[in-house]
Image: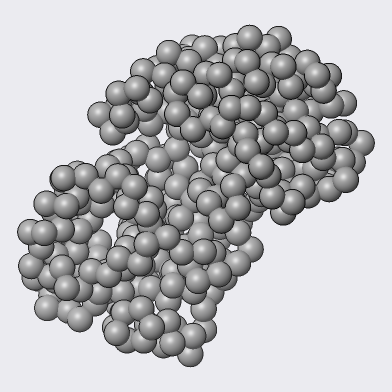
């Protein structure tokens, strides 16, 4: 069987949440199923690091799909032509986009519907594209895979897709995310936080990630405790809004907040593993991969009590109200000072993380693909 795959998000050095899902699942699926031919559809020159096995044929499709007009041209003209030329029997799209002009059977991976739930966080042109096309993509797909039961039900409720056509394929965590020993923790803290303990926030800085409230919560924590603890922020300032800027500028303890930008996985796992806890109190998540990465690094997690996050974290994290600065700050205080809490959460995280591996993700995605044969 010829399986064409949308691989436009496989960008060297720039993998994000969906990019990692694409990378980790396809790396396993292609090598474990040599009986099938895979046609990888890139929208620009590709890197050989993404050609995982001999049964992969890389193809560059034009134009580069990086904004709504080009998305339309790529998926409604470039992709159908490639599917026809390479005689594809199935089209797998790990990032949610399909082609409405192609009749090739398809499996669509829809990671979340954040644009339906929080349209205020999405630029106007992008929002209009999503609202028009994604309901149509969902209804056109032969099967849908998604990363949580929360999003499965969201797709059913908003788009009317039958639940029996939607498969849950949880995310995993990179093998590099492992605990850090005490000596390494000292080195990392000397390098990044002046030797002081720290909380950590990891994400592309976007309004729905709720950084403004988490910054305010940290400031409140510092006022109430006079602690020497610092706050490390890891992620690109892609959406550095006026609200976030104002929140930061009005903090009394902004000198204890350190922005590190984007880091590669090699450095990242050490910084996570040397932290007091991950703070990940987003307004909305379809899954929340950093929660699982923290579990694998043996550090506690503070996350939100909304959308998919309680499903992923279960009882292995402190759940907070993302709209309440006091709720987030109180969780920070408990992590820092409540005897035995960190150890209890770490142990629960070790149990919880067994649910989330990239091998399990690949197996479940393949099961979803097989249902379309």
Residue 53 image position (x, y, % from top left)? 83, 48
User: How many numbered callouts?
Assistant: 0
- Which residue is depicted at the point 25% across and 65% down? 332
- Where residue 170 sits in the image (x, y, percent)? 58, 42
Horizontal side, residue 220 vs residue 93: left or right: left
Of residues 314 and 29, the one drawn nearer to the viewer in this rendering: 29
Q: Residue at x 78, y 49 (%)?
A: 52
Quarter of the rendering containing residue 192: bottom left
Q: Quadrant of residue 19?
A: top right
Up/down of 109 relative to 276, above or below: above
Judged left or right of residue 151, residue 303 is left
Quadrant in the rendering for residue 248: bottom left
The quarter of the rendered structure image containing the N terminus is top right
Is 217 positioned to the left or the right of 11 in the image?
Answer: left
**Quarter of the figure that contains the C terminus:** top right
**Residue at left 60%, top 11%?**
100
Residue 342, given in percent of the width and then of the height, sits at 37, 72
Please state which of residues 106 and 316 is positioned toward the viewer in this rendering: 106
User: Which residue in the rendered view is the most extreme toward the bottom?
Assistant: 183
Question: Please, is residue 284 above or below residue 157 in the view?
Answer: below
- The colour scheme applied to this rendered structure is one colour
Q: Residue at x 13, y 53 (%)?
A: 247
Q: Residue furthest right?
A: 35
Image height check: is 168 above or below 316?
above
Asked whether 163 or 264 is in front, the reply is 264
Q: Is residue 258 something one can see in this rendering?
A: yes
**Residue 153: image location, x then y, percent:** 47, 25
Q: Is residue 143 visible?
A: no
Q: Is residue 318 above or below residue 128?
A: below
């Amino acid at each position: 069987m010829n399986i064409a795959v949308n691989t436009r998000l496989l960008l060297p050095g720039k993998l994000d949440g969906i990019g990692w899902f694409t990378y980790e699942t396809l790396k396993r699926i292609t090598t474990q199923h040599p009986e099938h031919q895979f046609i990888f559809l890139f929208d620009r020159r590709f890197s050989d690091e993404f050609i995982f096995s001999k049964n992969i044929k890389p193809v560059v499709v034009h134009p580069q799909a990086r904004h709504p007009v080009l998305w339309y041209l790529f998926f409604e003209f470039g992709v159908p032509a490639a599917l026809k030329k390479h005689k594809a029997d199935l089209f797998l799209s790990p990032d949610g986009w399909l082609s409405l002009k192609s009749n090739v059977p398809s499996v669509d991976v829809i990671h979340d519907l954040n644009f339906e739930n929080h349209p205020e966080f999405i630029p106007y042109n992008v929002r209009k594209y999503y609202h028009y096309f994604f309901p149509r993509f969902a209804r056109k797909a032969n099967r849908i895979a998604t990363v949580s039961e929360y999003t499965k039900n969201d797709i059913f409720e908003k788009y009317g897709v039958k639940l029996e056509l939607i498969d849950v394929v949880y995310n995993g965590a990179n093998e590099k995310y492992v605990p850090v020993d005490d000596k390494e923790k000292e080195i990392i803290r000397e390098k990044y936080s002046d030797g002081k303990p720290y909380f950590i926030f990891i994400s592309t800085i976007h309004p729905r990630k709720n950084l403004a409230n988490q910054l305010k919560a940290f400031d409140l924590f510092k006022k109430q405790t006079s602690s020497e603890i610092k706050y490390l922020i890891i992620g690109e300032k892609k959406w550095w809004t006026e609200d976030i800027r104002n929140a930061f500028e009005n903090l009394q303890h902004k000198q204890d907040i350190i922005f590190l930008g984007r880091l590669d996985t090699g450095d990242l796992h050490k910084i996570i593993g040397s932290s007091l806890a991950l703070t990940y109190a987003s307004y909305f998540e379809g899954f929340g991969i950093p929660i699982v990465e923290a579990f694998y690094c043996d550090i506690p997690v503070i996350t939100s009590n909304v959308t998919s996050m309680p499903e992923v974290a279960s009882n292995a994290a402190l759940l907070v109200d993302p709209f309440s600065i006091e709720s987030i700050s109180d969780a920070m205080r408990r992590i820092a000072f409540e005897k035995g809490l960190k150890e209890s959460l770490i142990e629960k995280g070790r149990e919880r993380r067994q649910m989330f591996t990239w091998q399990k993700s690949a197996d479940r995605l393949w099961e979803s693909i097989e249902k379309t044969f």
